[in-house]
Amino acid sequence: MSPLTLTLFWSWVKVNGPKVDVITSRGDKWLGGKDFDRWILNYLFPENKQTNSLLKAAEKLKCKLSDNNLSDTKVIKQEVITEKDKDIKSLALTKIQLNELLHQKGLFKSLNKLWEQTLAQGRSNGYELEDLTGVVIVGGGSRIPIIQKWILQKVGPEKLLTPPP
């Protein structure tokens, strides 16, 4: 297991001045940003071995596609020189294609499952969704617009405390 994939977690905390109590925390230690990079590579180059240079290029492409001001249909490219044969490969994707890929790979099923588990545990501790006063999103995945949109649909914009990156 790579520690770089430990990024998909929900935590519900209660803050009273300097005291922070964790109500519940749920996560998927097998799903995170590096998985998104692998999905992008498998989508674009299903026959290629996933080398470090290709994975880094996929990550850069993902970051470029996370720009909230970017058109959904604009093709974004990231070039990379392959390690083995020094060929230039061009990774190209639109925000729409990335969103479809994340749906196809079941990201939102996983998010919904974790969300429901977190709410259930919160309820068992006497809390309801309405008791949330704010939501802070962190990590690279929180910068992907479709994930931001998903969170906003769950909690509403008035509770989102993290300013855009």
Image (cartoon, rainbow, N blue to C red):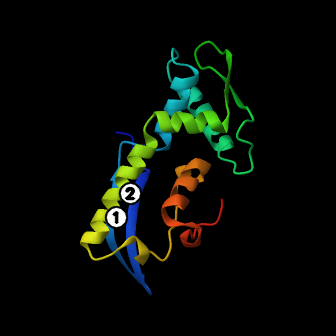
90 versus 39 height, above or below: above
Q: Position of residue 160 (x, y in %)?
A: 56, 68
Residue in the image at 53% along x and 33% along y: 101
Residue at disc 2, secondary structure: helix
Residue 48: horizontal and vertical position, in percent? 53, 16
Q: Residue at x 33, y 72 (%)?
A: 22
Residue 110, visible in the rendered structure: yes
Q: Secondary structure at mark 1?
A: helix
Instruction: Say what amino acid the circle numbered 2 marks.
Output: Trp
Residue sitting at 53 percent across and 49 percent down? 141
Assess disc 1: are there few (<14), some (14-19) or many (≥20) residues with their C-alpha within 10 Å of its C-alpha.
Answer: many
Q: CA distance from mark 1 to mark 2?
A: 6 Å
Identify the image quadrant of the C terminus. bottom right
Residue behind mark 1: 119
**Front position in the image: 21 or 159:** 159
Q: In the shown orientation, is residue 75 left or right of residue 132?
A: right
Q: Is residue 161 above or below residue 92?
A: below
Write the residue at 38% across / 57% down: 115
Q: Position of residue 25 (x, y in %)?
A: 33, 62
Where in the figure is residue 33, as x and y percent of width and height?
50, 43
Viewer-proximal residue among 58 and 120: 120
- Based on the displayed image, in which of its 4 quarters is residue 119 positioned? bottom left
Residue that badge 2 annotates: 115
Q: Are marks 1 and 2 in contact (CB under 8 Å)?
A: yes
Looking at the picture, tell me which residue is in the foreground, 82 or 9: 9
Q: Quadrant of the N terminus?
A: top left
